[in-house]
Image (cartoon, rainbow, N blue to C red):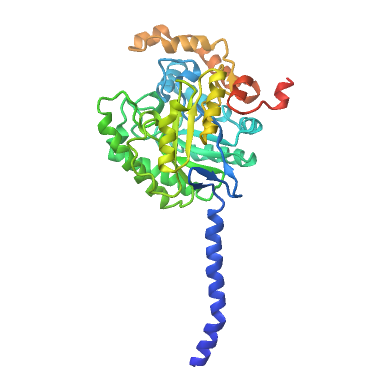
Amino acid sequence: MKLKSLILSTLLLPLAFSCIDKASDTAVSNKDRFVQVQGQDLIKPDGSKLYIVGTNLGNWLNPEGYMFGFQRMNAPRQINELFCELVGPDKTTEFWRDFKDNYITKEDIDFIASTGANTIRLPFHYKLFTDEDYMGLTKDQDGFARIDSVVSWCKANDLYLILDMHDAPGGQTGDNIDDSYGYPWLMESEKSQQQFCDIWQSIAARYKDEPTILGYELINEPIAHFFDNVADLNPKLEPLQKRAVAAIREVDPDHIILIGAPQWNSNFEPLQDTDYDPQLMFTCHRYGGPATAEAIQSYIDFKNKSNRPMYMGEIGHNTDEWQADFVKVLKENNIGYTFWPYKKKDDSCMMGITMPEEWEEVVRFAEGPHHTFAEIREAKPDRAKAQVALDKFIEQCKAKNCTPQGSYITSIGLSIPKKYIEQ
């Protein structure tokens, strides 16, 4: 009996080791499908270095007033209210559906890829993954469906995609860009923090095996500078980031996680721990100021101190000369970049939207008084004309009707596709 057991064990031993080897190979091969952090560099699965060059799909899944030509109606909820006042909630729902269907399409992603970009940053609102009222939906939100589409379009073009939670529960910034109520309540609300972590975990669970996604950017531009208690708020950020990283790692061990800093992704001093996850990198933003290395010296110093990759997630809205000079500075200092934004009203972007003439009435109403219902009634343009303006905007925002901004594109280190030069 012992002899039979010994023979059986001898026969099964190679098979057992074979199974272990295969399991180990699977784990290694799965990890090798993703971009890796190695010191201050990003390394692609083929072993080559990835230097991020690209753009942001701003305004699509997190509307911003200035991209429509508005100054007062800045945040998504304000824009939604404006459109409801103009044409009613039903027509506003239809507008947002058509907006999401047409503002960014495969044709846009194809164009971005044709310029030589290798990465796209996708800003999104947390409400796209809830049952909260947002962009015409209150249930069956389409956040995953929209991201799935972009993933497939990027995959077809060999582009990487960064998922950026631009608007977090409670608000992380305290300004229009995070659709907040004027304060970074996320930093003080346990309920919002738990929701924040839960949403990231659900996103990570869905995309844990998707190598087209370069990484998850936890929070865009946390904690604006103009609060009296900034010194109290700043220390609250890193513990929240660690909590979100832990939630993601429960379901996704492989993807890079991007960490931003307080005061518009510019003040890295409050971030003390840079080694709590091997797939961690940092992201900074810069608008204005001189286009010199000295202007971002604190970012460079933090990159060197942490020995982690640094990435300029947002930059732009300046002259072509300034942008070209800053691109040179970023390349010299090994800081990849995605300019902001890809598409908006007029210029200072890769694709400019020519606004319909009727849009002037929408802007006039948006900039007028809205303190009372009487003011709204008195200032509101004719409903039919407002509807024409919204309908024409949808047509004008389609890629085929937009105008590539040639000098802008070349200034950010990309190139104009030949077919557009010949037109």
Whether residue 380 is situated above or below residue 268 in the rendered picture = above
On the rendered structure, is 27 left or right of 192? Answer: right
State the residue in front, 400 or 18. 18
Horizontal side of residue 305 vs 10, given as left or right: left
User: On screen, 66 above or below 107?
Assistant: above
Count of numbered marks: 0
Residue 83 rendering spot, x and y as whole percentages? 45, 19
322 vs 287, nearest the viewer: 322
Residue 129 visible, this orientation: no
Question: Is the residue 182 above or below the residue 51 in the image?
Answer: above
Give the x, y percent position of residue 369.
Answer: 37, 9
Q: Residue 179 location in percent, x, y?
A: 39, 27
Q: Residue furthest top?
A: 378
Residue 138 location in percent, x, y?
42, 33
Q: Name the one closer to the observer, 106 or 272.
A: 272
Quarter placement of the C terminus: top right
Is residue 162 visible from the viewing direction of this image? yes
In the foreground, 114 or 96: 114
At 37% across and 43% down in the image, what residue appears? 197
Q: For the point 44% across and 50% down, which residue is it? A: 278
